[in-house]
Amino acid sequence: MTGASAVQPPAARQAHLILAFALLYVCWGSTYLAIRIAIGTWPPLLMAAVRFTVAGSLLYAFLRVRGTPAPAPRSWAAAALTGGLLLGVGNGSVCWAEQWIPSSVAALIIASTPLWMTLLPWLGRRAPAPPALVLLGVLLGLSGVGILLGGLHATPAIAGGTPPWAAAVVIVATLAWAVGSLWSRHLPLPSSPFQSTAMQMLAAGPLLTLAGAARGEFGHLTAAMLAPTPLLAIAFLVLFGSIAGFGSYVWLLRNTTPTRASTYAFVNPLIAVLLGWAIAGEALGWRTFVASALIVSSVAAVVLGSAGRRRS
């Protein structure tokens, strides 16, 4: 995939958009379960710090070897701000909260992100009111995840249901993610979306390390962290969650509207529930099928509504 400034034939651009959305939907839909597996033995914030530091280092080194020039200091400052909001506060909060709430519940709460992405520019008087079709899509998507949420029960590993304060932390994460995503379109980040991705991950790594140290997570390091299962989960998060998933998201923020890019939040809960069925043996009932129809309809409405506004 190329940067937003490159001139592409319509067919190639459409193919890149489809690929980016596919990676975003599938890769990020599976990261919630991978996070849950990893923090079974790893302290959550230090796990996130290692994930983003490794992913950012690999991607940054690859780009520099291929001749990508070093970014300007102001680009590093912009990456620190957006990376801190998106990955430090946004993802770090989810990792921390998944100590108490199921991964599928976390994915469902994240589904409120498109609501912030749609309403914040309007409330800040930086954009006109969203088209009716986009608002309908947001409502359909929230209705779908609400139906899924209504059918979830406490898992044996996390007894007692979802603590309200843990759910509130994930809601704060959605707001931080939305603000960081919207600001990233206007800050002096590098023209290459993949260099921007690498820099934001490298900036988030030290912030998460400091946060983990402040929580005393270095005192909870154990030999169990080096077992194959958590290491494979972290490797999955590095390759698919960070490089493929987050890279696709940053590219989409430059090549489509923030509202369309944020439709991943409607699809990810469905992926999370399906993975729970395939891996953990959770039953699929009528709620899943009704919610699936609403979620697919919501994505279609948001995409069509956003396209209509761009043409008008």
Image: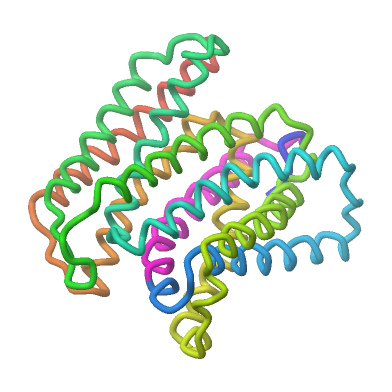
Image coords of residue 62 (percent x, y): 80, 65
The span picked out in magenta is 7-36
- Identify the image quadrant of residue 111: top left
Residue 272 versus residue 225: which sits nearer the camera?
A: 225
Q: In this view, does 277 lie above or below 135?
A: below
Which residue sits furthest left? 286
Image coords of residue 136 (percent x, y): 29, 22
- Identify the image quadrant of residue 235: bottom right
How many marks are shown on the rendered structure? 0
Image coords of residue 274 (percent x, y): 26, 62
Magenta region, main secondary structure: helix
Image coords of residue 31 (percent x, y): 43, 62
Magenta includes 22?
yes
**Residue shown at the point (48%, 71%) measured from the top left:** 43
**Residue shown at the point (17%, 57%) measured from the top left:** 161
Q: Is residue 153 left or right of residue 226?
A: left
**Residue shown at the point (85%, 37%) measured from the top left:** 74
Magenta includes 230?
no
- Identify the image quadrant of residue 140: top left
Q: In this view, does 28 lie above or below 83?
A: below
